[in-house]
Amino acid sequence: MAVNLPPLGTLLPVPGVRLGTACAGIKQHERDDLALIELAEGTTAGAVFTQNRFRAPPVELAEARLGSHAPRLLLINSGNANAATGQAGLEDAEALCQRAAQCGAQGIEAEQVLPFSTGVIGERLPLAPMRRAIKDAMRSLTANGWADAAQAILTTDTGAKGLTQQVQIGGRAVTLTGIAKGAGMIKPDMATMLAFICCDASITPNALQTIVRDAAERSFNRITVDGDTSTNDAFVVAATGQADHPRIEGPGARLDALRGGVSELAAGLAERIVRDAEGATKFVTVQVVGGATQAECLRVAYAVAESPLVKTALFAGDPNWGRFCMAIGRAGIPDLDPAKVSLALDDVAVAEAGLLAQGYDEAAAAAVMAKAEFTIGINLGRGPCEQSVWTSDLSYDYVRINAEYRT
């Protein structure tokens, strides 16, 4: 089930990037479950990774290699997270990277292959079929492989997620295309899912890393489905340097243009993740204004967005002010004055000055919550700051999907 998830559409090829997919049969045999993204020599990359302390071996390996080598291949598999697998899991990831380097273009070293895995936690990767699939995926490399790769990396997602656009940098058109997967274990602690954006901009690694962190903060760190942070999250941006514009080395108009393009693409992918949340029937924006700081606005927004009682009320379409009140109050704002707090569902006033609004119309509020998309507006009445997050409801299907995840 998904809430107005846009179709994938046409994804533009990025100069210097080829993609290939294959079926390794890791969890199922009906579709491809392994993807390769080949990057031209001279590509720069930046990334952010999960802060979960049970980080998977692929995360550890990818992060270490990104800090010391220019990447040439991204190796992604679905169906198995290769997490909680210890030293053996690390050796498995290294072996598959070695295989990809051997099958790849001449001159690619194993240290230039970054691994990414998603799926069931606590099981070893099936190396033999994955070795075969890597060779098959290498044979299928094409500049037009974005749609197939978007499909191959999915787990419980109901649809592929991808976006593309062009921006002007130094008078030249730069193409950005990205794909993402994620439907559960979605909670900001960097960027909870896998997402890959490639562009043909020319930029230094340090400048690109600045863009990646800023884009993640504005997008993937503003979404939550269930409040859980995965062991395998990664958000990677690669720039092949194929565009004919002066290299971006620091602050300026060119950096701002690329930052805007990456941030817009990341925000669109993040929104699609929430729209495709496991079992979701509602796409909800929690908008908090009137905060003393941005941080406290986010604390309140996430307290509301992640409350099981609020989320079940969203599913039921029940405008229960008590549940919103409870979540706001437990957000950990020590000097919050309830008498200054107000709440609205879209344009329907629910509470004012910490009490039910005069003339409150529960039927009108229920009509708002019956919609597939709406906004919970909260005013803390204590300052000029504001923040928003995207979330979903908690439905019967969410429980079913996760109860049956390994069966």
Image: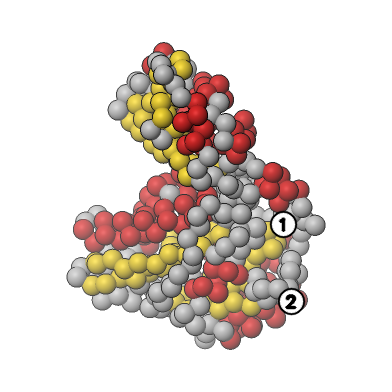
Residue 244 visible in the picture: yes
Q: Which quadrant would the C terminus be assigned to in this image?
A: bottom right
Report the disc number at residue 396: none
For image coordinates 44% across by 76% down, the residue present is 17
Pinpoint residue 167: horizontal percent, then vertical percent.
28, 66
> For residue 385, which quarter of the picture?
top left
Q: Which quadrant would the N terminus be assigned to in this image?
A: bottom right
Pinpoint residue 225: horizontal percent, then vertical percent.
57, 44
Report the disc number at residue 129: 2
SS at circle 2 = helix
Which sits in the foreground, 171 or 131?
171
For image coordinates 24% across by 61% down, the residue present is 254
Report the disc number at residue 120: 1
For image coordinates 49% across by 83% down, the residue present is 142
Colour style of the rendered protein structure: secondary structure
Pinpoint residue 166: horizontal percent, then vertical percent.
31, 68
Which sits in the foreground, 345 or 209?
345
